Amino acid sequence: MPIWMSLSFQNSFSPEMESINFFHDFSMTMIIFIFLLSSYFIFSSLMGEFFDNFSIESHELELFWTFTPTLFLMFLAIPSMKVLYMTEDSQKPCFTFKITGHQWYWSYDFMNCLEEVDSFYDSSLMSRLLKVSNVVNLPSFSNIRGLVTSSDVIHSWSIPSMGVKSDCSPGRLNQVFLMSKLNMLTVGQCSEICGANHSFMPIVLIFSIVLTIFSFVNTSMS
Ligand SMILES: [Cu+2]
């Protein structure tokens, strides 16, 4: 859940978001280290400590400042690619639902139901811009696939605590993967400026173990 005056990421509710959090902390540590190291060398050079006739046209020095940044970039690229592939991997979803963005509400199609459920913004002072008329109930501890599209302009379906964000383009289907490791309520909003009421398109998802048991029994019986 978003917290007032919070400067960092929201608490993670999915393995994908945990990996993103880890990668953020890891890359920030490296960036701070590089910043401190380069500041030290710049400051020392300005003070005249490293001026030496042997450092001019030194092959060893050139090799050092070519390979060290390459090494740092590789250390950043490997976990970055791992997170990218982890968030895009299909992982055999056990449940699929369709998300359609409209100006300015979301509608959800659960495939086995005959009609779409519309989810409008519900003005309430309890949770500002984060309450909806119909919440989405989903099973926890299950791999869920969301097919994302739009009926008018480009929207973006985003749940920060689950590391999910996907553009909803008209005439095109994108997919997102959700896997909650907790029974909880999580919120998101449209993240693409889509018109006058763009701020009034909240998303509320509730993950519960009851639905997980129900879908397991349902699958076993069929
Ligand atoms: Cu939108």
Image (cartoon, rainbow, N blue to C red):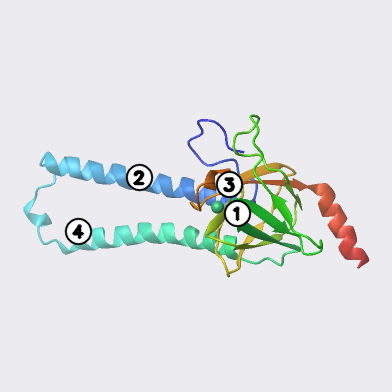
Q: Nearer the viewer, mark 1 or mark 2?
A: 1
- The answer to which quarter of the image holds residue 143 is bottom right
Q: Is mark 1 within 8 Å of ligand 1?
A: no
Circles 4 and 3, Cβ within 8 Å, touching? The answer is no
Residue 179 seen by the camera: yes
Q: Which residue is mark 1?
A: 16
Q: Which residue is mark 2?
A: 33
Position of the N terminus by quadrant: top right
Q: Position of residue 201 (x, y in %)?
A: 60, 47
Q: Nearer the viewer, mark 3 or mark 2?
A: 3
Circles 2 and 4, Cβ within 8 Å, touching? The answer is no
The mark nearer the N terminus, 3 or 2, is: 2
Q: Which residue is mark 3?
A: 189
Left or right relative to 44: residue 219: right
Q: Position of residue 175 (x, y in %)?
A: 62, 64
The mark nearer the N terminus, 2 or 4, is: 2
Looking at the rendered structure, the kind of residue marked 4 is Leu
Q: Nearer the viewer, mark 2 or mark 4?
A: 2
Left or right relative to 12: residue 84: left
SS for tag 4?
helix
Q: Position of residue 112 (x, y in %)?
A: 81, 64
Kindly identify the residue that appears in the image at 39 percent across and 48 percent down.
30
Looking at the rendered structure, the kind of residue marked 3 is Gln
Q: Nearer the viewer, residue 129 or 58?
A: 129
Q: Nearer the viewer, mark 4 or mark 3?
A: 3
Residue at mark 1 to residue at mark 4: CA–CA distance: 40 Å
Residue at mark 4 to residue at mark 3: CA–CA distance: 50 Å
- The answer to which quarter of the image holds residue 101 is bottom right
Q: Residues within 10 Å of mark 1 (few under 14, many from 20)?
A: many
Q: Which residue is mark 4?
A: 61
Q: Nearer the viewer, residue 44 or 188?
A: 188
The mark nearer the N terminus, 1 or 4, is: 1
